[in-house]
Amino acid sequence: MPNTYHYLGISLAIAGGCLAPLSYFALNSVSLTATGISTLILGLTAVSLARNESEAASEACRTLIDTTTKNNAPVLEKLDIKNKAIYLPRKMTNGNSYAIIPIDGQNNLQGIFAGSRSHRILENGPYLEEGALVVTTPGNVSLGLLPNKPGNSTADIKSAIQHLLVEVLDMASGAKVDHQDSRLNIEVTGTQLFKKDQPVYQCLGSPIASIAAAVSSEALEKPVRILEESSKKKTSKIVIEVLY
Amino acid sequence: MSARNRILISLAVVFTIVNILLSILGQTDLAVYFVINAIAYFVILLADINLVPRARPALTALSSLIFTGFLVVAVLKVSQMMG
């Protein structure tokens, strides 16, 4: 379906395509001919870029991600769970992307991982407190928007986060990733925050942090947890701890 | 600003600056304008092409076309110098 970029590109290409020969043959002006060629190139570039995702698609994806947060909020608030979510790679969850939140906060993770999943509870014994809550986070949902599984290098993680946040969701303008020992320091610039801090962000992280964590977990094929998250102006700094 | 807008705005600004500067300097060779604009195009595109994955095939085709023009200009200039 034609969009603004199509119309802009076609207009520029026609204008440039007419201006270049006219300037060269009729007006005998080299600089105007060059301007015509430049305009033609700019027009063809705009037409090529029109093939990328539409802004409507970005808006739809952001709404879906917002909905995921809203769906989790009542459950977490009702159970009064404030522990940090652990994002699991699809390799550990039989292909279903989700995160778990230890209910008691004791973090007997090995036991929890070995437990059996029953609906939204990962059971690890007779008591509910010994298990973990299974949640689908904004990050888990957005993994489906990646064209392929990210590689485990820092550059691959950065590229995947940028692809999701900048191009698909249009929620930021750039990202930097620094891997130090068992920590990933991620800086996302030009962020558009959803709303003010919500209580659910304490468990899952903000949508941006959640996406960064889910991508990191999938790329490294290890469980990860959001350790810290801070925002200043339009820059978000996220520290992710890689577990095991 | 999305990657698409950044690419288009960067190209428009750089093309304008290059053409105005060369015109002020009195350049009358169209090949010089084309080569400098083509180099600017490749540099700008190289920086951001990964952020527009679905547009990459079309942009690659356009880049190939410009690169062919670049090569033709280069070959003509070299043959002129040799001859």
Image: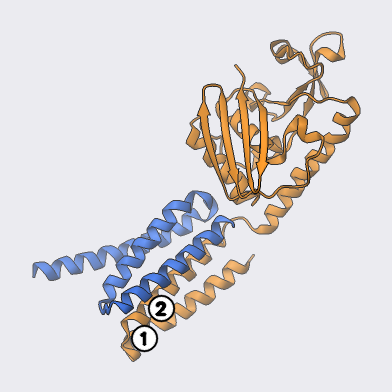
Chain to which the residue tagged by mark 2 belongs: A
Q: Whole-percent x and y of residue A198?
A: 81, 39
Q: Whole-percent x and y of residue A98?
A: 72, 29
Closest to the observer, B20 or A232: A232
Closest to the observer, B7 or B61: B7
What is the basis of the colouring in this image?
Answer: by chain
Residue at numbered disc 2 = A36
User: Residue extending furthest bottom?
Assistant: A26
For chain B, the rendered hue is blue
Closest to the observer, A103 or A18: A103
Q: How many labels does the image show?
A: 2
Closest to the observer, A177 or A120: A177
Question: Could you tell me if the residues under marks 1 and 2 are in contact, i.e. CB atoms within 8 Å?
Answer: yes
- Position of A38 compared to A7: left or right? left
Give the amino acid type for the residue marked by disc 1 in the picture: Ser
- Position of A233 compared to B41: left or right? right
Q: Looking at the image, is A183 positioned above or below residue A141?
A: above
User: Where is the N terminus of chain A found, in terms of image quarters?
Assistant: bottom right
Residue at numbered disc 1 = A23
First reached walking from the N terminus: tag 1 or tag 2: 1
Give the amino acid type for the residue marked by disc 2 in the picture: Gly
User: Residue extending furthest front?
Assistant: A232
Q: How far apart are marks 1 and 2 (CA)?
A: 8 Å
Q: Whole-percent x and y of residue B64?
A: 37, 59
